């Protein structure tokens, strides 16, 4: 049997090997330490991450697969981030979760890892960790929940919360009915069932090669998820034997496939910061412009909420990711491998679309060119992004007067003020929501529309922000404006009444204010310094070291990889 990394703890007859084995025995037989691979199951199950609360059951199937293939499974609970609960935003903790997982994998006698994630930040943080420790790794995505209904109508988890709450504000839905819908929103175990960030990151990770092809998108309660978990456990043992590592799999070619997939499924804009961060860990030279260059001309083939009609259960029934990728096979890089060792494109010939309403044929796309557009201009010198597929066609080119909010609190306090000087042509600007400014870059860019405009029937306006947007949200929202206001970005200088010009076709975002006048302006102190100035702890470390959205909002000292080196002995 080949020498394993874990053998550096367990092999031999000296005192230290004795200590390492003896404390681990607890029912394990002696041959568990004879050089067979030890596979960590990095498990983000948590009651406070309800989207992932079923992952302990999934872990059991992984364990069985590992044992069956001759490995030893090791359950490793890792930091879990529940999108709906964690404050001030789960994104503040993504890098911490990635760092903690990376370090615990490196510090322990582990030869390979199965990564169990689901809710928005969990798969990204696990992949960032796997990339930096570069141990053989495979992801098992926890899967979306089943479709719930309210008054006979399917509810899109997340998306319909925004829609129903806007209806209450517009006076077209009672608060009682709104509250009643609450028990229908989450029908089953699993993560959000729209094409939000969790679904997007699972599918994009499969396109990246991190998941057994065909598994992502399997609903959480579907028994095929457990079958896939079992197979992934087996595969982890094979990965160790083959010495196949993330650095072998996640190449520039893999990121091409991920970006094509992101566009074709109409995935969440959050995938941009996550893919950039993962690439940064691997040393793959991925840039913000690559999303536009590779993805913007890709047709939109999936009719899912938030921009479309259906939900993830429909998507899986209709053929899933492989059916989508088969339609755009010519755009994929055929050299990109998956965890199985085979190219992604090898899995496409058997794929089929079973419901062309949910997954469109290439010749009948929902939109011809639907990927993420990267905008530049004097308002976003290092870029901003917008998702044309989620925008209103009449707002793709728009000139309007700015209505400025200096913080999320300022926005909440004034957005429904009857005296707010706003009309449907206004451009809503929200500052102080970038990585440093909030801190943590929350999903607030899709700010609610003013109540008085909602009551007039207005359902979309141009909105501009240095934060992110929930993957379950929609609208003409320009986000990830870089540099952010709190990092010296010109967004800090925008004042009420300034004219802003958005031209998505030509990728422009301009503040039409005389440069001399701009040079005279000083932004308010809070916008420049951020709204939190933490004294200690992770937030202090984060604010001091976080990079901007255009490179993935990772910490500067976490970029790259230190591999799986074994540190010096602890005794
Ligand atoms: Fe967990 Fe949406 S809240 S995926």
Image (cartoon, rainbow, N blue to C red):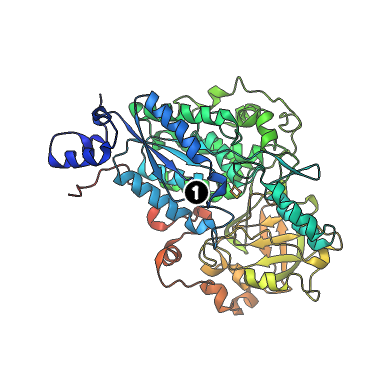
In the picture of the structure, the residue carrying the numbered disc 1 is 46
The structure residue drawn at horizontal position 71% and vertical position 65%, both measured from the top left corner, is 428
Label 1, secondary structure: give it.
loop
Structural crowding at the residue carrying mark 1, measured as other residues with C-alpha within 10 Å and reported as few (<14), some (14–19) or many (≥20): some
The single residue placed furthest to the right in the displayed view is 456
Report the side of 86 relative to 559 (left or right): right
> Which residue reaches farthest front?
27
**Rendering coords of residue 301 (x, y %):** 70, 35
The residue positioned 25% from the left and 24% from the top of the image is 1
Q: Where is residue 388 in the image (x, y as percent from the top left)?
A: 70, 48
Where residue 36 sits: x, y (%)? Answer: 29, 28
* Residue 291 image position (x, y, % from top left): 58, 45
Say above or below: 486 vs 130. below
Number of numbered discs:
1
Q: Left or right? Give the position of 118 relative to 464.
A: left
**Which sits in the foreground, 97 or 253?**
97
């Amino acid at each position: 049997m080949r020498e394993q990394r874990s053998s550096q703890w367990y092999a031999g007859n000296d005192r230290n090997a004795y200590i390492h084995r003896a404390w681990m025995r607890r029912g394990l037989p002696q041959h568990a330490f004879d050089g067979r691979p030890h596979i960590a199951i990095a498990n983000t199950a948590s009651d406070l991450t309800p989207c992932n609360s079923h992952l302990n059951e999934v872990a059991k199937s992984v364990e069985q697969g590992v044992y069956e293939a001759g490995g030893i499974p090791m359950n490793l609970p890792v930091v879990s981030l529940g999108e709906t609960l964690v404050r001030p935003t789960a994104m503040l903790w993504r890098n911490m979760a990635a760092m903690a997982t990376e370090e615990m994998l490196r510090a322990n006698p582990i030869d390979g890892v199965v990564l169990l994630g689901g809710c928005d930040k969990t798969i990204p943080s696990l992949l960032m960790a796997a990339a930096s420790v570069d141990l053989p790794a495979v992801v098992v995505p926890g899967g979306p929940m089943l479709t719930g209904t309210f008054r006979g109508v399917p509810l899109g988890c997340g998306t319909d919360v925004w829609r129903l709450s806007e209806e209450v504000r517009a006076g077209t839905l009672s608060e009682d009915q709104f509250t009643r819908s609450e028990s229908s929103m989450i029908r089953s175990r699993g993560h959000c069932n729209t094409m939000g960030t969790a679904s997007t990151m699972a599918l994009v990770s499969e396109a990246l090669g991190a998941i057994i092809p065909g598994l992502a998108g399997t609903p959480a309660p579907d028994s095929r998820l457990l079958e896939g978990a079992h197979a992934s456990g087996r595969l982890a043992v094979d990965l160790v034997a083959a010495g196949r590592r993330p650095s072998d799999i996640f190449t520039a070619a893999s990121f091409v496939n991920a970006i094509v997939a992101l566009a074709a499924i109409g995935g969440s804009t959050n995938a941009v910061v996550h893919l950039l961060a993962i690439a940064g860990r691997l040393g793959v030279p991925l840039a913000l412009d690559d999303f536009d260059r590779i993805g913007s001309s890709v047709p939109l083939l999936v009719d899912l909420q938030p921009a479309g009609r259906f939900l993830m259960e429909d998507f899986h029934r209709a053929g899933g990711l492989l059916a989508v990728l088969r339609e755009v096979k010519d755009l994929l890089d055929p050299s990109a491998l998956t965890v199985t060792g085979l190219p992604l494109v090898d899995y496409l010939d058997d794929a089929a679309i079973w419901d062309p309403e949910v997954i469109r044929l290439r010749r009948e796309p929902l939109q011809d060119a639907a990927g993420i557009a990267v905008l530049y201009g004097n308002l976003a010198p290092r870029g901003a992004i917008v998702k044309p597929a989620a925008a209103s066609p009449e707002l793709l080119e728009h000139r309007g007067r700015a209505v400025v909010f200096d913080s999320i609190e300022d926005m909440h306090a004034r957005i429904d003020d009857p005296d707010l000087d706003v009309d449907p042509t206004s451009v809503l600007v929200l500052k102080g929501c970038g990585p440093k400014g909030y801190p943590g870059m929350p999903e607030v860019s899709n700010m609610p529309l003013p109540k008085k405009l909602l009551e007039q029937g207005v359902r979309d306006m141009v909105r501009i922000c240095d934060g992110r947007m929930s993957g379950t949200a929609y609208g003409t929202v320009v986000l990830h404006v870089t540099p952010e206001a709190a990092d010296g970005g010109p967004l800090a200088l925008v004042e009420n009444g300034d004219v802003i010009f958005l031209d998505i076709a030509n990728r422009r975002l301009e503040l039409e204010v005389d440069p001399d006048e701009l040079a005279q302006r000083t932004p308010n102190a809070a916008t420049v310094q951020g709204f939190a100035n933490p004294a200690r702890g992770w937030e202090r470390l984060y604010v001091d070291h976080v990079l901007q959205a255009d490179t993935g909002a990772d910490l500067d000292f976490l970029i790259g990889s230190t591999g799986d080196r074994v540190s010096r002995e602890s005794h």
